[in-house]
Image: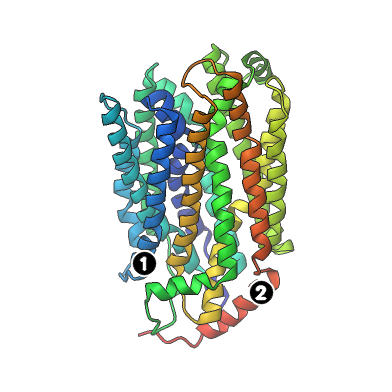
Amino acid sequence: MNLESQRIPLKEKIGYSLGDAAANFYFQMYIVFMMYFYTDVFGLAAGTVGTIFLFSRIWDAVNDPMMAAIADRTNTRWGKYRPWVLFAAFPLALFGVLTFTTPNFGIVGKIIWACFTYNFLMMSYTANNVPYSALMGVMTGDSIERTALSSARFIAANMAMLAIQGFALPLVGKLGKGNDALGFMLTMIVFSSLALLFLIITFLSSKERIKPAPGQKTSIKQDLFDLAKNRPWVAMFIMTVFVFIYWSMKGSIGIYYTKYFVDHNSLRRFLEFFPFLRRGAALDVVKTGFTFFSVSGVLAQLIGIMCSKFLAVRFGKRDVFRVCLFLSGCSTVVFMFLSKDAILLQFVFSILIQLFYGPTVPLLWAMVADIADFTEWKTNRRATAMTFATILFALKLGLSLGGALAGWLLSLYGYVPDAQQTATALKGIRYLVSLYPAIMFFIGVVALLFYEIDRKIEIKMEEELLERRKHYKYE
């Protein structure tokens, strides 16, 4: 194997990237709209939703290492990871729709329904996304090519984010015709169908090139022990938990901030500068304003993603990640001081948050692949799916804690669904989109101080592993 053989054709990069577009049809829906759907459409109390999120997402996170162990030990003519990308896509589509379906049940029945459908959605997502993420680690051993693949992946993911944040609420309104419960279900049918098609394309177009060293023992205990001794993995695990507490907390509260805190008259005047935006009643201002801010943020993040490879080559993944995370956190803090009618400043800083964060998006998973290399470099053992799965565990643990904190704090500050909020509730909403999430980013910056894989070590690992793999003999 040489470096040239690890170059990935553009067609394959595009095919692989569609898999993350598919994942984001689900991921963005439950990050951005799940809390709002459960409280203001489905009819559950915010505290109840927070508790469901905590226990369901922690259970889901526990599934990740289990799925990784299965995937790492899968051997088929299609490879280790590609079969799971295909076969898990079907239950994922089914439960994606059922989770956003509102049955005509009483409150207890609705809680049971929410727990059942949400948990099976997340288990299906795990069965699909753990192998999909690990697939990137075995498509190439070239660090820069891997960053390019990750960038392509997240450009596609951002396209899906644009679709979700730009079209979800308009589709809910159009398809539901005033019935948001029906609108959410029909919208999810559209998104789940697209996701299923994209995952089939990913399966057909991707290729696994890197295999574990021949004769490697497949001990789950040893896989976990290797990771526990891996300082970059520990740093990345901690950082990922707090970064996704940020996104779960801030992402869940964004629509509440627009609906209850932002001055609607000021928002309307701001939107009138853009003639392509539809004007209407207060509720339409909320939906249009939230959608416009969200789409603008995604576009800004996309610019950051496209800069990621250049910055990583120039400064190294770790250093770019630390600086960008810090700048994004600083921009988040500013929302604590903005008044309800400071629409232009709200818009500018929401753009800056996403712009600064953008370069980190593909770097996270490229760095996880580097950690898998680091383990192989140090121990001559490779467990790609387990490495990715444990970071996905951290991601989902962050989502669990962030979603639970958002629900509990909304309840603590006195939030009442679809009603005029008290000054205390509005204060809580402001803090949940500013100070509280920003603290999580700053903790992530500190964690990365202990991530030791800089650009020099990346190059050294790549060269030595390439030489070592030349001598592997497979049956």
The amino acid type found where label 2 is placed reads Ile
Q: Earlier in the sequence, mark 2 or mark 1?
A: 1
Between marks 2 and 1 in the image, the one whose residue lies nearer the viewer: 1
- Along the horizontal axis of the image, is 23 left or right of 161? left
Q: Between 113 and 121, which is closer to the camera in this rendering?
A: 113
- Count the numbered circles shown: 2
Inspect this view and state whether residue 146 appears.
no
- Residue 198 at x, y percent in the picture: 40, 48
- Residue 11 at x, y percent in the picture: 49, 57
Instruction: State how far apart marks 2 and 1 are (Cα).
Output: 28 Å
- Residue 123 at x, y percent in the picture: 34, 50
Inspect this view and state whether residue 256 appears.
yes
Per the image, label 1 sits on a secondary structure element best described as helix
Q: Residue beneath label 1, please?
A: 69
- Along the horizontal axis of the image, is 176 left or right of 401? left
Quadrant of the drawing holding the C terminus:
bottom left
Q: Residue beneath label 2, please?
A: 457
